[in-house]
Amino acid sequence: MIKRVFDICFSLSALVLLAPMLALIAVWIRLDSPGPIIFRQERVGLRGRCFSILKFRTMWRSAEADGLQITVGADARVTRAGRLLRKYKLDELPQLVNVLRGDMSVVGPRPEVPRYVALYPSSVGEVVLSVRPGITPPASVTFRH
């Protein structure tokens, strides 16, 4: 309960404080390439419930149809704005809305797409899906550098 209250207070405060920067990023994405500003993708959350994760779009509109579901290295599908947004993890900021909705937490295991969750051994799936997924995993907080 305390963690959920923290998540709500943190994400709401962050969204209010970052609103001008979020608006500038949205305009930059719109000017950089055609397509929606927000990328939505189905992910698996608490107790295996699926939800739509929100991110700033960092790839060309048809990127999912043109290649793998993951990106490695200098992927040609990443836009100019997307390179910088990914480098500084700014593409993740819309997930603060997912935190407010209750789909995610600020800190927790990263949510995965359903087809990868289906590959989890049952013992791993039980543990990972027993908590809300997070914007940042616990290891990133503990071992930042």
Image (cartoon, helix red, strand yellow):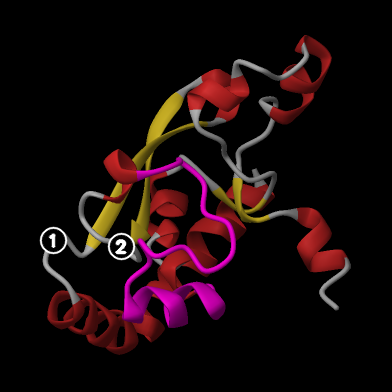
Q: Inspect the image, locate mark 2, and give the three-letter code of the amino acid beneath it.
A: Arg
Above/below status of 46 relative to 78? above
Find the magenta span and give its range.
67-89
Q: Quadrant of residue 55?
A: bottom left
Q: Residues within 10 Å of mark 2 (few under 14, many from 20)?
A: many
Q: Which residue is mark 1?
A: 35
Element assignment for label 2: loop
Q: Residue at x 83, y 14 (%)?
A: 123
Image coordinates of residue 144 in percent, x first then y, are 82, 74
Residue marked by disc 2: 57
Q: Is residue 45 magenta?
A: no
Relative height, residue 60 to residue 45 (above, below): below
Front residue of 65/95: it is 65
The quarter in which the C terminus is drawn is: bottom right
- Give me the C-alpha separation between circle 1 and circle 2: 8 Å
Q: Is residue 71 magenta?
A: yes
* Among the two numbered marks 1 and 2 on one chain, the one whose residue lies closer to the N terminus: 1
Residue occupying image coordinates x 70% and y 25%? 130
